[in-house]
Image (cartoon, grey):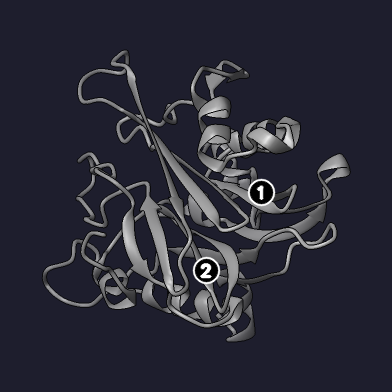
Amino acid sequence: MTELKDIGWLAKQEYLGRGILIGRCDGGEFAAYFVTGRSPSSRARRFEVVSDGIRGMAIKTAPTDPETLRKGNPALLIYSAVLGVRDGLVVSNGLQTELLWGEAANALSHVFSPVRNLMGALGGSYEVSGVDIASFEPDAPNFTPRISGIVNKGAGALAISKKLPGGFDNPCQKQFFGFPLEDGIGKFISTYTGRNVGKGEVLPSFEGEPLDFVVPGRSLRETAEFIYEALGPKQGGQYVSPGDDFRVGVVVASRLDRGNIPYFMINRCDLDKKNGN
């Protein structure tokens, strides 16, 4: 096990983009997913729970201001973030969540494996409207990595698809990580390193293996609240954008239970409205 990170480490990172934490607290497996954004179009979103046909209950990103959202790329901003499947969950920062769900739902019980399902879903290419949703996002100059995860019956897996250095045509690097889940310890991955950059510079993509992370809470609610608070505005001369609030929302969900996904979510837009902002 590498050096353990904790909520204090998270609170020092200025901009991580999107992040996934998979772990277990009080014996229950969970997946936490957060969204932060630097642009108005990225922040014009919230999490919402919907009924999603054969997929059942789904936790999706949704617009808070459709006009502002259209100034970005809705195909990269609106998607299913968490879906329940079999006895577990699939989670990601884009449309690839649907690929994960399909791969896991079709797997035979004797070959169902989180890391194998990730590799089966994302190992090749899959185009939607000309965009390969198993590859990095075409949002130059950052080319945001796609991060994905699966949790099921004591085991978890994470994946990242990111562009290798160089021009747009450089190949996509795909990494897959499988691991057992331990009480109080999770695995964390994000799209960026946590270091913010100035306008016109390229955000550095996450590197290396997922981080070992102390689960910040004993319940879904506590974990969500700790993460949301840690992602808040930073103060100090060492930060590029001191005082800026990049938060969109946090959702922490437990594995599928009789067709339902136990969850707790926090949307910044709801808190702003409650506080009169």
Residue 130: % across, % down:
57, 15
Residue 250 vs residue 138: left or right? right
Task: Point out the frontmost of discs 2 and 1.
Answer: 2
Of residue 247 and residue 22, the one placed in the foreground of this image is 22
Where 125 sits versus 260, above or below? above
Between 205 and 55, the one lying in front of the other is 55
> Residue 24 got which mark?
2
In the image, residue 264 lies at what x, y percent?
A: 65, 73
The residue located at (32%, 61%) in the rendering is 212
Residue annotated with mark 1 = 66
Q: Position of residue 138 (x, y in %)?
A: 43, 26
Element at badge 1? helix
Residue nearest the viewer, comparing 42 with 20: 20
Question: Judging from the image, what secondary structure is the residue with disc 2 in?
Answer: strand
Q: Amino acid at mark 1?
A: Pro
Q: Residue furthest front?
A: 110
Q: Earlier in the sequence, mark 2 or mark 1?
A: 2
Q: Position of residue 221 (x, y in %)?
A: 59, 80
Q: Which amino acid does the dot numbered 2 rest on? A: Arg
The residue under the point 44% across, 73% down is: 227
Residue density around tag 1, few if under 14, some if 14–19, many if 20 or more, within 10 Å: few
Q: Residue at x 54, y 65 (%)?
A: 249
Depth check, front residue: 207 or 231: 207
Q: CA distance from mark 2 to mark 1?
A: 36 Å
- Residue 66 lies left or right of residue 86; in this view the side is left
Can the viewer see residue 172 in this picture? yes
